[in-house]
Every structure is written in structure tokens, then in C-alpha cells.
Image (cartoon, rainbow, N blue to C red):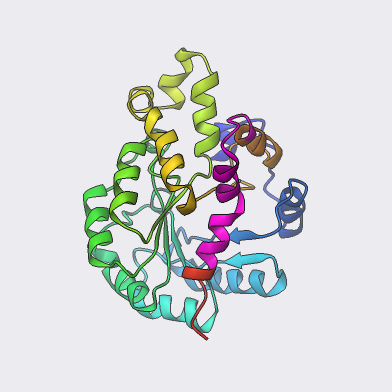
Amino acid sequence: MIKKAFPGHPSTEDMTPERVLADVRECGVTTVFNMVFPIKEHETEKLNEFSREIGQTYDNVVPFGSLHADTPRKDEVAQRCLVEYGLAGIKLHPYVQGFEAFSPVFEPLYRKLNELRRPLLAHTGFDVFYNQSQDLDYLRGILERYPEMPVVLVHSLFPRFRLAGELMGEHENLYLDMTNVISAVRFYRDSPPERWSTEVDAAAMADNIDYFFDVLERYSHRTMFGTDHPAGMGSPRQIYADFDSFDFDPVISANLLGNTARGFLRKCCVREG
């Protein structure tokens, strides 16, 4: 999919962990999050074992687990990932995995994460790119019912920055992730209008662009940024160049480029003791 959207993208199908880490290390990155998500239910356990092995092999990789909508005993899978395997949290990518992440199907997972006070990371936004949508009303309910479960809105509901800001104001355990968002906003800012209709939801962007900056000013201490390498919107160098082009306030930059992530790991991803 990334090659279809960006034919000149530098990533290849034979990318290795060593090459991925080398690419981001050139940009000054010291620690990375490793995300997995099974496309089919039977892939769940193997991918979680792979994530555990990656974390054990590379001391600068923070591994996350995942599961599928069809995975039975979701609470037990989460318990195994977080307690036995030592993974940091659970990541879902509903558009790619082919299900709705914010739904009753995942209530056992939410309950377990709330009990353990461990994070749920869920892809949100980029509806035009994926030609799909999400149940954001159910998301509101999840945030209200499970206040001890940290939630990271990966891609910050792009481009619904107004809603993202509202939810951040209501839930102190909610975090935003600006991965790919910075590059998408830069694309909107710099590209000719005739390209907006095919690549970006131009009407939604026009309604939300001011809230993008407002969210960063108010909540950078709960907002993170990453490259999504090797599936981001270009090479790591290009993605960081997009970030630098905004000349953010130094406090905002420091938070997005590391401070928030370090605080998130300490608060949300480390077991007591």
C-alpha cells in the first residue's frame, strides 16, 4: 500500500530490522517502538512472539503486541503479552486488519488493559486514504468507561483535530500521536489545491487546520511523533525535514521528539516492581 501511495518510497519488501534501525539512527533516533498487527487471526501468537524476540534482541526497541477481532479470550492474550512476554501495550490497526477497533468485540481487551493500567494504541484517521471510517462515538464511551487504560490515538484522528483536542481536554490518560500527520499537514500547506481532493480531505482540513496548532500548543506534553518507518510518508530524513519545516516552539519540538514518549513509557508501559 505504501508503494501504491508513494511510488518512489525508498523502502523495499526485504527490509530487515538492522536496516530499519540504521535508517532512523542516522536521524538521531535512539529508541523505537515496534508495532505488529495480525491480518488473520491465526497470525496473532506468532507475531506477538516475534515482537517479544525483537525486544529481547535489540535493547533500543520497545515491543508492542496485538490481536485480531476473531482472537478468542482477548483478555488472556493481553495478559500473556504484557505480563509473560513483557510487551509494552497492545496496538490495533483496524483499517488494515479489517475490523472496527472501537466495538463491543474488544470489551474483554479494554477491561484487561484497564485492570493492568496498560496502553491501547489504535490507528485513527486518514479515512480518505483508506476509504473507511470509525465509530468515534463508541470511542468516547471507551474513554469514559475505562479511565485507567491509557489510550493513544495513532495519527490523532487526522484530520479531526478539533475533536482530538476536545477528547484530550476530557481525558487525562489520552495521548495523541502525530506520525504521518506532520507530513500530511505539510503536504496540505505546500501542494496545489487540485491535489487536495484526491490525497487530503480538503474541506475537513480547512475546518480543522487551526485546531492542529491549538492541540500542539495545549497538549504537546501528551503528544508523540514518529516516522512509521519503513511505511511512513517518505524516508526518515524527509519526514524529519517535514517536521523541521514548521519551526515549532522548542518546548513543543522537545515534547514531540522524545520527552512525551519517555514519560509515556515510564507511566504507562512499565509494570509495578
151 relative to 196, above or below: below
Residue 44 screen position, x and y as percent? 47, 69
Determine if the magenta segment contains residue 256: yes
Q: Nearer the viewer, residue 181 or 135?
A: 181
Determine if the magenta segment contains residue 18: no
34 relative to 127, above or below: below
> From this viewpoint, which residue is outermost toward the bottom?
273
Residue drawn at point x = 37 percent, y = 72 percent: 113
Residue 257 screen position, x and y as percent? 61, 49
Q: Is residue 238 visible?
A: yes
- The segment highlighted magenta reads 244-265
Residue drawn at point x = 53 percent, y = 40 percent: 180
Quadrant of residue 131 in the image?
Answer: top left
Prevalent SS, magenta region: helix
Report the number of numbered marks.
0
Relative placement, left or right, of 122 versus 191 is: left
Relative placement, left or right, of 34 versus 100 is: right
Residue drawn at point x = 48 percent, y = 47 percent: 220
Relative placement, left or right, of 255 versus 199 is: right
Q: Is residue 234 visible?
A: no
92 relative to 271, above or below: above
Residue 242 screen position, x and y as percent? 61, 32
Q: Nearer the viewer, residue 224 or 109?
A: 224
Residue 60 screen position, x and y as percent? 69, 65
